[in-house]
Image: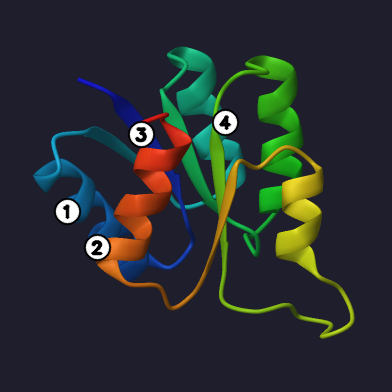
Amino acid sequence: MKRVVVIDDDESIRRTLGVLLERAGYAVVLAPDGEEGLRHCRAAVPNLVMTDIHLPGMDGIEVALALRTLAPELPVIVMSGGDRTARLDLLGSALLLGAVRVLRKPFTIDEALSAIEAALGG
């Protein structure tokens, strides 16, 4: 069973993605911030990480960079509901920094599953 770590400070998004992924047959680990998400990844490298950009403490870009060091081949999907500055394309930056896919919130179940399957090579 493929393991996915979901990192998002919004509890409703974390839970929704957790249920969606479990129903799709994935083992899921949920984390409310980047530090906890990285601890889970260091304990056992997952098959995929989904992270929000805007997180308390370590943001999603920092998480993606840390994961590139930990496991360079680990696919990362970066999610965001919008850029805080409106002058920066953070999702575009995430792609340049190694994310394999980005999801702009709100996204549909089909968009999420499609991004996950593509990231996992399926």
Q: Alpha-carbon distance for marks 1 and 2?
A: 5 Å
Residue 4 — which label? 3
In the rendered image, the residue lying farthest to the bottom is 86
- State the image quarter where residue 111 is shown: bottom left
Task: Choose the circle earlier in sequence order: 2 or 3.
Answer: 3
In screen coordinates, is 106 left or right of 1? right
Q: Alpha-carbon distance for marks 3 and 4?
A: 12 Å
Residue 38 — which label? 4
Secondary structure beneath label 1: helix
Residue type highlighted by circle 4:
Leu
Residue type highlighted by circle 3:
Val
Q: Which residue is identified by label 1?
A: 19
Other residues around mark 2 within 10 Å, as few (<14) / some (14–19) / many (≥20): few
| Residue at the image point whose x is 31% and y is 26% from the top | 3
Task: Choose the circle earlier in sequence order: 3 or 4.
Answer: 3
Q: Which residue is identified by label 2?
A: 16
Q: Considering the image in quadrants, where does the C terminus appear?
A: top left
Is label 2 or label 4 in front?
A: 2
Residue type highlighted by circle 2:
Thr
Task: Choose the circle earlier in sequence order: 1 or 4.
Answer: 1
Is label 3 or label 4 in front?
A: 3
Is label 1 or label 4 in front?
A: 1
Task: Choose the circle earlier in sequence order: 3 or 1.
Answer: 3
| Residue at the image point whose x is 24% and y is 63% from the top | 16
